[in-house]
Amino acid sequence: MTDDNAAIARGIIDANRYMVLGTADEAGLPWVTPVWFAPNGYREFFWVSDPQRRHSWNLAVRPQVSIVIFDSTVPISTGQAVYMSAVAEQLGATGLVDGIRVFSARSEEHGARPWTLEDVTAPARHRLYRAVASEHFVLGEQDERLPVSPSALP
Protein backbone atom coordinates (compact mmCIF):
# COMPACT_ATOMS: atom_id res chain seq x y z
CA MET A 1 0.00 0.00 0.00
CA THR A 2 1.39 3.35 -0.97
CA ASP A 3 0.42 6.96 -0.47
CA ASP A 4 0.16 7.09 -4.28
CA ASN A 5 -2.82 4.72 -4.12
CA ALA A 6 -4.52 7.01 -1.61
CA ALA A 7 -3.84 10.04 -3.79
CA ILE A 8 -5.41 8.24 -6.76
CA ALA A 9 -8.48 7.31 -4.70
CA ARG A 10 -8.88 10.86 -3.34
CA GLY A 11 -8.50 12.33 -6.82
CA ILE A 12 -11.16 10.05 -8.30
CA ILE A 13 -13.64 10.72 -5.50
CA ASP A 14 -13.04 14.47 -5.68
CA ALA A 15 -13.38 14.66 -9.47
CA ASN A 16 -16.54 12.63 -9.99
CA ARG A 17 -20.20 13.12 -9.22
CA TYR A 18 -21.67 9.67 -9.72
CA MET A 19 -20.89 6.36 -8.10
CA VAL A 20 -22.14 2.93 -9.06
CA LEU A 21 -23.78 1.22 -6.13
CA GLY A 22 -23.83 -2.58 -6.13
CA THR A 23 -26.56 -4.17 -4.01
CA ALA A 24 -28.08 -7.63 -3.70
CA ASP A 25 -31.51 -8.86 -2.68
CA GLU A 26 -32.36 -11.51 -0.06
CA ALA A 27 -31.46 -14.31 -2.46
CA GLY A 28 -28.18 -12.66 -3.46
CA LEU A 29 -29.35 -11.47 -6.90
CA PRO A 30 -27.12 -8.48 -7.73
CA TRP A 31 -28.28 -5.07 -8.91
CA VAL A 32 -26.19 -2.01 -9.80
CA THR A 33 -27.36 1.57 -9.87
CA PRO A 34 -25.58 4.84 -10.61
CA VAL A 35 -26.34 7.52 -8.01
CA TRP A 36 -25.25 11.13 -7.68
CA PHE A 37 -23.32 11.32 -4.41
CA ALA A 38 -21.97 13.72 -1.83
CA PRO A 39 -18.86 12.57 0.02
CA ASN A 40 -18.02 13.46 3.59
CA GLY A 41 -14.31 12.83 3.46
CA TYR A 42 -13.37 9.63 1.65
CA ARG A 43 -15.21 6.99 3.69
CA GLU A 44 -18.75 8.34 4.01
CA PHE A 45 -21.03 8.83 0.98
CA PHE A 46 -24.57 10.23 0.85
CA TRP A 47 -27.26 10.04 -1.85
CA VAL A 48 -31.00 10.46 -2.11
CA SER A 49 -33.27 7.86 -3.60
CA ASP A 50 -36.84 6.69 -3.73
CA PRO A 51 -37.26 3.93 -1.11
CA GLN A 52 -39.43 2.04 -3.62
CA ARG A 53 -36.54 1.52 -6.07
CA ARG A 54 -34.89 -1.88 -6.32
CA HIS A 55 -31.54 -0.82 -4.87
CA SER A 56 -33.32 0.76 -1.89
CA TRP A 57 -35.32 -2.44 -1.28
CA ASN A 58 -32.09 -4.41 -1.46
CA LEU A 59 -30.43 -2.19 1.16
CA ALA A 60 -33.31 -2.79 3.53
CA VAL A 61 -32.57 -6.55 3.59
CA ARG A 62 -28.82 -6.62 2.84
CA PRO A 63 -26.83 -3.51 3.83
CA GLN A 64 -23.49 -4.76 2.47
CA VAL A 65 -22.69 -2.96 -0.79
CA SER A 66 -19.93 -2.45 -3.27
CA ILE A 67 -19.18 0.92 -4.82
CA VAL A 68 -17.11 1.99 -7.79
CA ILE A 69 -16.35 5.55 -8.83
CA PHE A 70 -14.70 6.22 -12.19
CA ASP A 71 -14.54 8.66 -15.09
CA SER A 72 -16.27 7.03 -18.05
CA THR A 73 -15.11 9.70 -20.51
CA VAL A 74 -11.41 8.76 -20.66
CA PRO A 75 -9.92 6.85 -23.61
CA ILE A 76 -9.81 3.04 -23.56
CA SER A 77 -7.02 1.60 -21.39
CA THR A 78 -6.43 4.90 -19.57
CA GLY A 79 -9.18 4.68 -16.98
CA GLN A 80 -8.73 4.51 -13.26
CA ALA A 81 -11.28 3.70 -10.58
CA VAL A 82 -11.71 3.45 -6.86
CA TYR A 83 -13.50 0.31 -5.62
CA MET A 84 -15.02 0.12 -2.16
CA SER A 85 -16.67 -2.33 0.19
CA ALA A 86 -19.20 -0.59 2.41
CA VAL A 87 -22.27 -0.87 4.60
CA ALA A 88 -25.21 1.31 3.63
CA GLU A 89 -28.43 2.41 5.23
CA GLN A 90 -31.40 4.68 4.88
CA LEU A 91 -30.88 7.36 7.49
CA GLY A 92 -33.46 7.76 10.22
CA ALA A 93 -33.32 10.39 12.92
CA THR A 94 -29.69 9.61 13.76
CA GLY A 95 -27.39 11.28 11.27
CA LEU A 96 -30.13 12.82 9.14
CA VAL A 97 -29.38 16.46 10.03
CA ASP A 98 -25.63 16.15 9.39
CA GLY A 99 -26.18 14.02 6.29
CA ILE A 100 -28.60 16.40 4.60
CA ARG A 101 -26.21 19.27 5.35
CA VAL A 102 -23.40 17.45 3.50
CA PHE A 103 -25.67 16.43 0.63
CA SER A 104 -27.21 19.89 0.24
CA ALA A 105 -23.82 21.65 0.28
CA ARG A 106 -22.55 19.42 -2.53
CA SER A 107 -25.79 19.92 -4.47
CA GLU A 108 -25.47 23.69 -4.28
CA GLU A 109 -21.74 23.52 -5.05
CA HIS A 110 -22.64 21.86 -8.36
CA GLY A 111 -25.33 24.37 -9.24
CA ALA A 112 -28.37 22.41 -8.08
CA ARG A 113 -30.91 23.27 -5.44
CA PRO A 114 -30.45 23.01 -1.68
CA TRP A 115 -31.98 19.99 0.08
CA THR A 116 -33.83 20.11 3.40
CA LEU A 117 -35.07 17.58 5.94
CA GLU A 118 -38.54 18.01 4.46
CA ASP A 119 -37.20 16.77 1.10
CA VAL A 120 -36.14 13.42 2.58
CA THR A 121 -38.80 12.62 5.17
CA ALA A 122 -42.40 11.46 4.76
CA PRO A 123 -44.47 12.36 2.84
CA ALA A 124 -41.64 13.36 0.44
CA ARG A 125 -40.72 10.89 -2.33
CA HIS A 126 -37.01 10.61 -1.48
CA ARG A 127 -34.98 9.45 1.49
CA LEU A 128 -31.36 10.07 2.41
CA TYR A 129 -28.95 7.13 2.33
CA ARG A 130 -25.39 6.74 3.59
CA ALA A 131 -22.65 4.25 2.85
CA VAL A 132 -19.58 3.95 5.04
CA ALA A 133 -16.64 2.36 3.24
CA SER A 134 -14.44 -0.14 5.04
CA GLU A 135 -12.05 -0.91 2.15
CA HIS A 136 -10.73 1.04 -0.83
CA PHE A 137 -8.83 -0.29 -3.85
CA VAL A 138 -7.43 1.25 -7.05
CA LEU A 139 -6.20 -0.37 -10.25
CA GLY A 140 -2.58 -1.40 -10.62
CA GLU A 141 -0.59 -1.59 -13.84
CA GLN A 142 -1.73 -5.16 -14.52
CA ASP A 143 -5.40 -4.36 -13.76
CA GLU A 144 -5.03 -5.87 -10.28
CA ARG A 145 -6.79 -4.20 -7.38
CA LEU A 146 -4.32 -2.48 -5.05
CA PRO A 147 -5.42 -1.71 -1.49
CA VAL A 148 -5.45 1.83 -0.19
CA SER A 149 -4.18 2.35 3.33
CA PRO A 150 -7.09 3.24 5.63
CA SER A 151 -4.92 5.74 7.50
CA ALA A 152 -4.34 7.67 4.24
CA LEU A 153 -8.04 8.44 3.73
CA PRO A 154 -9.62 10.81 6.25
Image (tube, rainbow, N blue to C red):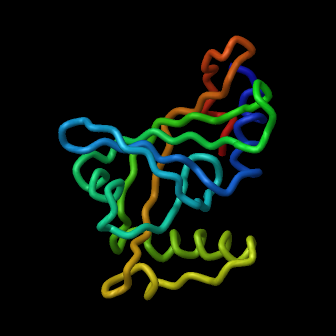
Seen from this angle, which residue lies furthest left? 27
Which of the 4 image quadrants contains residue 127? bottom left
In this rendering, the answer to whether 9 lies above or below 129 is above
Q: Is residue 154 above or below residue 151?
A: below
Q: Residue, x 36% and y 63% (percent of image)?
A: 90
Residue 97 in the image, given as x and y percentages of width and height: 48, 76
**Where residue 91 appears, x then y in whole percent?**
37, 66
Q: Residue at x 70, y 37 (%)?
A: 9
Quick one: quadrant of the N terminus?
top right
- Rendered-image quadrant of the C terminus: top right
Q: How many labels were placed on the picture?
A: 0
Image side of residue 8 versus residue 25, left or right: right
Residue 15 location in percent, x, y?
76, 51
Name, please, the residue furthest toward the top. Answer: 142
Q: Is residue 73 above or below residue 92?
A: above
Farthest-out residue, front: 76
- Which residue is at the front of the view, 154 or 86? 86
Q: Nearer the viewer, residue 66 or 86?
A: 66
In this picture, residue 74 sits left or right of residue 124: right
Residue at (31%, 42%) from the top-left corner? 24
Q: Where does the image place residue 51, in percent across and percent down from the top left? A: 32, 67
| Residue positioned 42% across, 79% down in the render | 120
